[in-house]
Image: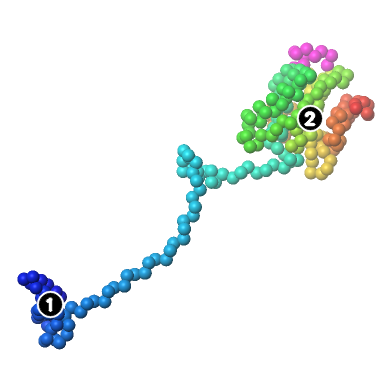
Amino acid sequence: MVRLLSLALIHTCETCGQEWPENYCPECAHTIGKTAKLAVPPPLPPKLPNPPAVPPQRVGESPIARLFGFLKKPAPALEPAGPHPHHRNFARMFIPTALTRTRSGFLSAKSEPHASRSLQKAWRECGARVLPPELLAPSAGLSVSGFRHEKFLCLLFIFPVAGESHFGFIVAGPSDDWSPEVRAKVPVRYFILERSASSVPVIFEWRPSTTEDDELFDSLGPGPSPQNPPDFVQAILSRFYGLKPNAIQ
């Protein structure tokens, strides 16, 4: 122990407790206050690994938005030949609904020379009402053409390639009067040619219902190859309306 006394250093022996002007105790014969061994500082902790990189944040994006963006999965890719919601809704719901609610106007509008243009607009509007943008299908290839067969009005729809339906075919009639009032009540039948699990497509016919269920289609068995649209028209007219073979080219 060391203390100051009258500006002089006084050393106190740790053993006998006596004070001496020097750091040596003659009574105990040992040095007072031997310099303690310097303590060795503890070793530094091991270097920590670098923290994971934080992806850059978009300006104005909240933490919740970033979280949902991280969890969001991309929409699954749809097979070109498989069911497509936009395609299916149009072929199996939009057209039957139009025939049910606005039959007269629909038959008239789709018989016009430029009906394919309005049909493509209806395709886009039909999809935008019920589907997110990533599930909308292009309208490329969509068209409609009309003709008369005896007392019947016929409309042939060619659907876009991406989807399960190749063609749609409406037969309205028979009727001698095609005024708007009569046309609104004229009998109609709607057929579609769809892909199947095999290489042979299948013909379906719409069965009207007040529930407007898109599954109300009855299978009529195998159909013709979709390579030539008139083959589908001829198959329907010859089977149900007595059209002679090879009458349509």
| Observer-nearest of 68 and 130 | 68
Report which residue position mark 1 lands on.
11
Q: Secondary structure at mark 1?
A: strand
Horizontal placement of 132 versus 52: left or right?
Answer: right
In magenta, the rendered stretch is 175-184
Cα distance between the residues tagged 2 and 1: 113 Å
Q: Residues within 10 Å of mark 2 (few under 14, many from 20)?
A: many
Q: Quadrant of residue 138?
A: top right
Q: Position of residue 157 (x, y in %)?
A: 78, 28
Q: Position of residue 227 (x, y in %)?
A: 85, 35
* Classed neighbour count for the residue bearing mark 1: other residues with Cα under 10 Å, few (<14), some (14–19), many (≥20): many
In this rendering, the answer to whether 156 lies above or below 14 is above
Could you tell me how many numbered marks the image carries? 2
Q: Report whether 160 appears left or right of 46.
A: right
Residue at image point 53% right, 43% down: 69
Q: Residue at x 71, y 20 (%)?
A: 102
Judging by the rendered image, the residue that carries numbered circle 2 is 158
Residue 177 in magenta stretch: yes
Q: Amino acid at mark 1?
A: His
Give the quadrant of the N terminus: bottom left
Q: Which quadrant is the C terminus positioned in?
A: top right
- Residue type, numbered disc 2: Ile
Q: Extreme front residue here?
A: 7
Which of the 4 quarters of the picture holds residue 199? top right
| Residue 200 at least partly seen | yes
